[in-house]
Amino acid sequence: MARKKKVAVLLSAGAAKGFAHLGVLKALEEHNIPIDLIIGTSMGSLVGACYSIVPKADYWIKKLAEVTPLHLFDLNDFKINPRGLMTGNSLQHYIEKHLGISTFRDTIIPLIINSADLVSNKSVKFTRGKISDAVRASGGIPLIFDVVRQKNKLLVDGFVIDPIGIKWLKGKYDLVIVVNVNTANDNLITEKSNAFDILLRSVELMQRELVHEKIKCLNNAVLIEPNMNGLRYTDFHRAKEFVERGYAAGKKVIKQIKKYL
């Protein structure tokens, strides 16, 4: 009897662009591509957590399409703090109360959530406990969110060290599917752009280069990079477009993926 092929899926950081991960997962699901591990960073950790508990892309596309910045950041999140502008409490509340996500023990697909520690200068993984705590630590964009304190660690967004959490890819996998949503080739930055837009564009360029550098060590990877031209990190109201871009990108590489299986 032939050995079952093992597949890992790595979902990058990307704020609102992370909705494209759902489109990719939908394409994989439609073609019966197995998933044995999900590693998620930042927005990829939120999407990965959702899918690992209920592996049905259409369910989460409908559920997460309702997400707006107001769900994730309300006025109570803002406070005068030298470490960040927001607490991130609303994000955790939304994950627990509205998405119904609780602990890693509830996952059907094994899940690793990737964060970064400013004290040790190393990536940190979450595989147990409350998923909302892990997603909060993984998505703590520096300056925007307060750091997460965990014993002697100060945790921020995982993209700072590794936007796809490739360090946690242990064991033998026949195929590694890397989804990187930091791919906009058009430059929306102009002389009128504000500091926040400039920061996000800088982060995007950094993440794109980091992902390309990280995957050089893999000889069994398929890289999926949806076309993000014209879309911004902050376009939460355009979730449907992000999903469509991800779905199109996923379908394009199905034949390539099946060669490994």
Image (cartoon, rainbow, N blue to C red):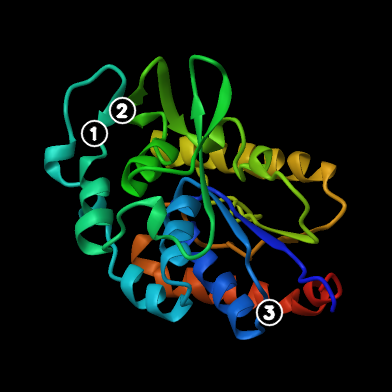
The image shows a total of numbered marks equal to 3
Amino acid type at image mark 1:
Thr
Q: Secondary structure at mark 1?
A: loop
Q: Quadrant of the C terminus?
A: bottom right
Q: Residues within 10 Å of mark 3 (few under 14, many from 20)?
A: many
Q: CA distance from mark 3 to mark 2?
A: 38 Å
Q: Which residue is mark 1?
A: 87
Instruction: Please say if 74 is above or below 224.
Output: above
Which residue is denoted by mark 3 in the rendering? 251
Residue 14 in the image: above or below residue 239? above
Counting residues from the start of the chain, the first of labels 3 and 2 encountered is 2
User: Would residue 113 be visible to someone looking at this image?
Assistant: yes
Q: Secondary structure at mark 2?
A: loop
**Residue 157 x/y as whole percent:** 46, 35
Q: Is residue 219 left or right of residue 79?
A: right
Residue 194 in sight? no
Residue found 24% across the figure and 55% down from its top: 96
Q: Quadrant of the rendered structure where residue 216 is? A: top right
Q: Earlier in the sequence, mark 3 or mark 1?
A: 1
Image position, residue 56 (x, y; %)? 46, 77
Q: Which mark is residue 57?
A: none
Q: Which residue is mark 2?
A: 146
Give the residue type that dot 3 points to: Lys
Q: Quadrant of the N terminus?
A: bottom right
Name the residue rendered at 30%, 54% in the picture. 102
Measure the alpha-carbon separation of dots 2 and 1: 5 Å
Amino acid type indicated by mark 2: Asp
Task: Kindly state the secondary structure of the residue where label 3 is placed.
Answer: helix
What residue do we see at 27% from left, 48% from top?
91
